Structure formats: C-alpha cells, structure tokens
Image (tube, rainbow, N blue to C red):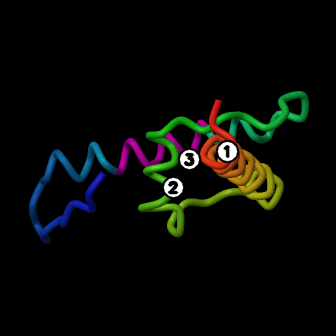
Amino acid sequence: MADIINFPNTNNKQVQQQEEQIQRTQNTLNILLQCKSIGPIPLLPKDIEILAEFGDTMQFSPMVAKKLIQAMAKQLNQLHDEEVYPL
C-alpha cells in the first residue's frame, strides 16, 4: 500500500479509501486484542502491510500494543523456524 499524496483543496477518493482502511485496521486490531479471552492472533498480510507503512500514526492502548508486538514476534519466529527447519 503506497502512501497517497493529498493536495490541498482537492477531494481525492484514493486518500479517503486509504484513511478508511487504516482506521478499519486500527479498530479491528484494538477490538480483537482488547479481549482477554483471546490469545495471540495471527495477523493478516494486509494488517502487517498497513502496520509497516502507517503504524507510527496509529493509536493503540499499552495492552493492545503489547499483544500486537507478541503476535508479530510469534509470526516472525514461525517464519524463521520454517526457513531454518523446512518440512
């Protein structure tokens, strides 16, 4: 997902769609990770892409941020294990 430039005094539909997608991802992750009964969740590739590009502008509570770091680290560790120890 590329960062789309919004020029002043213009109505760019792509910018609106991108902002909506970022907000939707942020809301979804906040809701999923605030649940105490849910353990670490696998992140979708689209979520990872949005976090990589816009994570510095997204708002998460400290607990959600901790769980998000845990989920990302777990997935990264699994990818590493698959490369080191392929089936």
Q: Quadrant of residue 43?
A: top right
Q: Quadrant of residue 21?
A: top left
Q: Which of the marked residues, 2 or 1, is nearer the chain's N terminus?
A: 2
Q: Which mark is residue 64?
A: none
Q: CA distance from mark 3 to mark 2?
A: 9 Å
> Are the residues at dot 1 and dot 3 in contact (C-beta closer than 8 Å)?
no
Q: Please tell me which residue is depicted at 89% across the width and 35% down the height of the picture.
A: 36
Q: Which mark is residue 75?
A: 1
Q: Which residues are magenta?
A: 19-28
What's under tag 3, amino acid-wise? Gln
Please indicate whether residue 36 sits to the left or right of residue 6 in the image. Answer: right
Q: Which mark is residue 26?
A: 3
Number of on-image labels: 3
Q: Position of residue 26 (x, y in %)?
A: 56, 47
Q: Which of the marked residues, 1 or 3, is nearer the chain's N terminus?
A: 3
User: In the image, which is nearer the foreground, mark 1 or mark 3?
Assistant: 1
Q: Which mark is residue 51?
A: 2
Q: Please tell me which residue is depicted at 64% across the width and 41% down the height of the picture.
A: 82
Q: CA distance from mark 2 to mark 1?
A: 14 Å
Q: Please tell me which residue is depicted at 75% across the width and 40% down the height of the picture.
A: 33
Q: Position of residue 56 (x, y in %)?
A: 53, 69
Q: Is residue 24 magenta?
A: yes
